Image (cartoon, rainbow, N blue to C red):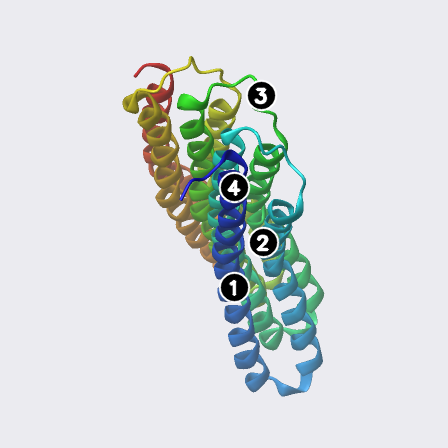
């Protein structure tokens, strides 16, 4: 059976849409389930405030849902947008878009569920600070969504960019690599940011007077946890905007695809590890506010060491792009 260019591009768009929404549904559902599970436990401990717990659960689930909504928007665009069907690079871009948005929504969806669940548990424990807990939950969850937003930005760029002047080889590999770099790296940062946000809600519910210190340490810890996804975004931008000389040798394409895989997978562990360090610091700051400065210092040193592996991945990715 013969396939012309239009059929191949349409097939890539449909496949990319399926990947984006299929993978994009995973994280949000898990995060929402975690929030609901904690809400059930909270309600059983303090049924008198079931209304507050229920409202907080729905708000937390709505934030976690946003990652899958990003994926839905990207999938719909690929299904129904009228794009040029005369350049095979558009097909490669659609596949990269699906991978970018699909993987990119997983960590943010799961991570956003942690503060939602812990806020519900905290409201049952300390009903008097329910508004503080909800505010802290929203702030922490919003930061968790940052990697998913990075993925959506890269996805939209690949959908709407023009590739008229770009050679097919090795640009097709650069486009798929760009999607993998941001999408995979977003998993760790979204999940790690959620660990820190969940610990902050727990800490405030146990020691309400520590809210200022807890929120500060949470935000600093989350900021560091986001850096692997920023590295992934940087590598994606280079792959998208660097003009590569025309080449149909396999090693040229595999170097660019390898760069995306290297930075993408290389960003998962550091994002989660940085979140674990922040989670521990936030939890103990709530219990010992006087040691907040020392705890933050230890957190930052630990995160810096954990971050080194993401830097190694970025170095290798840049070597693959510019040297190999």
> Residue at position x 56%, y 86% from top?
44
User: Who's the residue at 41% across and 14% down the image?
Assistant: 246
- Report helix, strand or loop for mark 3: loop
Q: Which mark is residue 31?
A: 1
Q: Position of residue 175 (x, y in %)?
A: 47, 31
User: Which is more N-terminal, label 2 or label 3?
Assistant: 2
Q: Residue 7: which numbered mark, if any?
A: 4
Q: Secondary structure at mark 4?
A: helix
Cα gap from disc 1 to disc 4, whole angstroms: 37 Å
Pointer 4 local density, CA inside 10 Å: few below 14, some 14–19, many at least 20 = some
- In three-dimensional space, the C-alpha distance between marks 3 and 1, rounded to whole angstroms, equals 41 Å
Q: Quick one: 231 or 50, which is closer to the camera?
A: 231
Which quadrant of the rendered structure holds the C terminus? top left
What residue does disc 2 label?
67
Foreground mark, 3 or 2, reads: 3
Q: Between 54 and 265, which is closer to the camera in this rendering?
A: 265
């Amino acid at each position: 059976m013969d396939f012309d260019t239009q059929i191949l591009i349409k097939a890539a768009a449909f496949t990319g849409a399926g990947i984006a929404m299929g993978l994009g549904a995973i994280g949000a559902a898990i995060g929402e389930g975690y929030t609901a599970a904690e809400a059930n436990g909270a309600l059983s401990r303090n049924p008198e405030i079931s209304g507050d717990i229920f409202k907080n659960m729905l708000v937390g689930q709505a934030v976690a849902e946003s990652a899958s909504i990003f994926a839905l928007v990207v999938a719909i665009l690929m299904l129904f947008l009228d794009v040029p069907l005369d350049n095979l690079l558009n097909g490669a871009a659609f596949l990269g878009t699906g991978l970018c948005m699909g993987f990119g929504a997983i960590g943010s969806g799961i991570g956003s569920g942690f503060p939602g669940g812990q806020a519900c548990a905290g409201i049952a424990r300390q009903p008097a600070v329910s508004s503080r807990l909800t505010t802290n939950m929203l702030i922490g969850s919003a930061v968790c969504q940052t990697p998913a937003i990075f993925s959506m930005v890269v996805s939209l760029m690949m959908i709407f960019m023009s590739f008229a002047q770009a050679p097919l080889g090795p640009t097709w590999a650069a486009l798929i690599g760009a999607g993998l770099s941001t999408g995979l790296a977003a998993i760790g940062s979204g999940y790690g940011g959620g660990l820190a946000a969940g610990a902050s809600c727990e800490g405030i519910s146990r020691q309400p007077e520590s809210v200022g210190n807890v929120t500060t340490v949470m935000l600093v810890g989350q900021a560091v946890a986001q850096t692997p996804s920023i590295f992934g975004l940087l590598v994606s931008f280079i792959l998208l905007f660097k003009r590569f000389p025309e080449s149909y040798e396999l090693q040229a394409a595999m170097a660019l695809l390898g760069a995306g895989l290297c930075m993408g997978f290389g960003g998962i562990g550091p994002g989660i590890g940085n979140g674990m360090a922040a989670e521990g610091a936030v939890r103990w700051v709530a219990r010992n506010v006087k040691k907040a400065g020392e705890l933050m210092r230890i957190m930052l040193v630990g995160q810096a060491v954990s971050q080194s592996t993401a830097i190694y991945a970025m170095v290798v990715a840049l070597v693959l792009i510019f040297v190999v």
